[in-house]
Image (cartoon, rainbow, N blue to C red):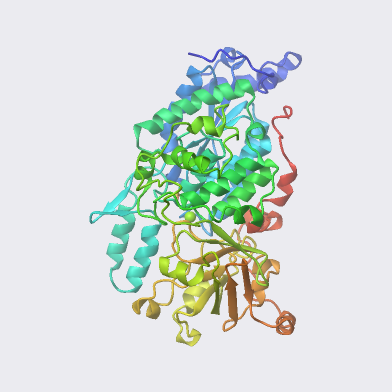
Amino acid sequence: MPSEKRPTKPLRSADWFANAERIDMTAVYLERFMNYGLTPAELRSGRPIVGIAQSGSDLAPCNRIHVELAQRVRDGIRDAGGIALEFPMHPIFENCRRPTAALDRNLAYLGLVEILHGYPIDAVVLTTGCDKTTPAAVMAACTVDLPAIVLSGGPMLDGWMHGERVGSGTVIWRSRRKLAAGEIDAEQFLEAAAASAPSAGHCNTMGTASTMNALAEVLGLSLPGCAAIPAPYRERGQMAYATGRRIVEMALEDLRPSKILSRQSFLNAIAAVSALGGSSNAQPHLHAMARHAGFELGAQDWRQAFDIPLLVNMQPAGKYLGESFHRAGGVPAVLSELLRAGRIDGACASVTGQSLAHNVAGRSSNNRDVIAAYETPLMDRAGFLVLSGNLFDFAIMKTSVISDEFRARYLSQPGQEGIFECRAVVFDGPDDYHARIDDPALEIDEHCILVMRGAGPLGFPGSAEVVNMQPPQALIQRGIATLPTLGDGRQSGTSDSPSILNASPEAAAGGGLAWLRTGDRVRIDTQRGRCDMLVPEAEIALRKQAGPPPPPPPSQTPWQELYRATVGQLADGACMEPALKYRGVAAASPP
Ligand code: FES
Ligand code: MG
């Protein structure tokens, strides 16, 4: 049944297709759509024209399920009385894009803004999945401010090998350690990686992809329950259909991101990412989405959520994968727990036209081993620790993945000291790390912290997921599998090392990391949120006179140069700073 609603305001597509004053232009606009069979009558019928922003392709395999799901989205759009126009987004494939997929979030954002602004589109379905596709699409939706709904492609099925779950990403980090320790060979490494990817879908761990899709749902931008449905499940196609139906109504209701998102929506997301054991990449992406929506997030917002417990038992923080999470109730069950504990605001709006609290009413965990109750969590105080000091103004540490031993040693419990010092071993970028990590002259032992600089948005460029460095082989063979790490780049959401990440400003932007040298002492005070190099001011001044560390590599492509010219720091979301002054560019009026 088509929606019986009438548009609350004239549809912008009418300016192209039903403009009585410019029949010459109307004719030009209309004629070429006919070459695949659309009729002028359809395009001029006053029905909402709904874009499907297609993020899947052969180059973006994590999102490739959307190539098929789009048919169910179209069915939903058509049945509700809309007309679907599908178009491609710039592909983003996290694992494959060189030098790093992080470059492409802002590029895909930019491309989508131009499409939505410049074509006759009244509303859009944002197809998301792989890490950066979700923030890129949401950032663009905020800039154009057209009615928009997120459709996740869903995670892959659970991976299994030798009777054990193997999760995407986590299997790579663990296998690397096993390879270094001589426990497996190269063939077994490949076999483990393949076992972790048994079907269509994005990473099946609570890595960046599952985190960002869950957060889109928390922000109220997708239908309840959308994020966690595995890609091959029948519910995924049904969700695609429901999403297509709902976006037509949203177009008629003129329900835009600016009417859904508030600063509180983003505070809800910060609370949720801790309970989910979500990726540290959520920090820059949430800040970026919030800023494009007109809200600022800061260190204090993360500090307030630090005591949120870990509720979701999913790799890398726990043991299960996407299928179990979905079956246990998915994001609505987690939101129910947080709502009951008073840690999120249920009054926030959503694409359903109803509040978050209304959307998740009656949706509770049906497997406490997978989604725990707030009172009996998997881990207390599992949020992100925010640090600052003379090495950087802002960095975060994900605490839910840190081993019990590390937590006991380094993380302050209430009323406990929580200060630790280590000897810094400094690397200038990933190549330097790979070249020198096993060099005995570095004298790396269990009292060291591995430091990576030159890995931020300007330095790399794009900001690389390289801060999670493995200790030297000799240490691993002695049974020391992880060392604390620190850096101005990011960490893969599926790694489990204790790391201080996203340090801003980065060394290449003049941050304090630039003046750190191997052998310096670094003191971390988790109680006071400090991280400092114990180097006298006078000595730092001398080092500044001696000159900065090696300059970043030159840009290899035009976009890398443009990216560097416009990008901000990870603390601020690594946005294209000049883009932030644009908001509501398509909603206000046709171009
Ligand atoms: Fe694409 Fe993980 S690599 S979702
Ligand atoms: Mg990743």
Q: Quadrant of the C terminus?
A: top right
State the image quarter where residue 564 is shown: bottom right
Vertical relation: 326 (above or below) 552:
above
Q: Residue at x 28, y 68 (%)?
A: 184
**Viewed as shown, does residue 186 lie left or right of 31?**
left
Q: Residue at x 31, y 63 (%)?
A: 189
Q: How far across and how far down the image is residue 298, in percent? A: 67, 54
Q: How far across and how far down the image is residue 317, in percent? A: 42, 56
Vertical relation: 37 (above or below) 173:
above
**Viewed as shown, does residue 165 lie left or right of 341?**
left
Q: How far across and how far down the image is residue 530, in percent? A: 63, 69
Answer yes or no: is residue 467 visible. Answer: no
**Viewed as shown, does residue 437 lie left or right of 219?**
left
In-front residue for pair 496/308: 308
Residue that extends furthest to the bottom in the rendered view of this protein = 441
State the image quarter where residue 534 is shown: bottom right
Vertical relation: 578 (above or below) 329:
below
Q: How far across and how far down the image is residue 444, in percent? A: 47, 82
Vertical relation: 35 (above or below) 507:
above
* Numbered disc total: 0
Answer yes or no: is residue 378 visible. Answer: yes
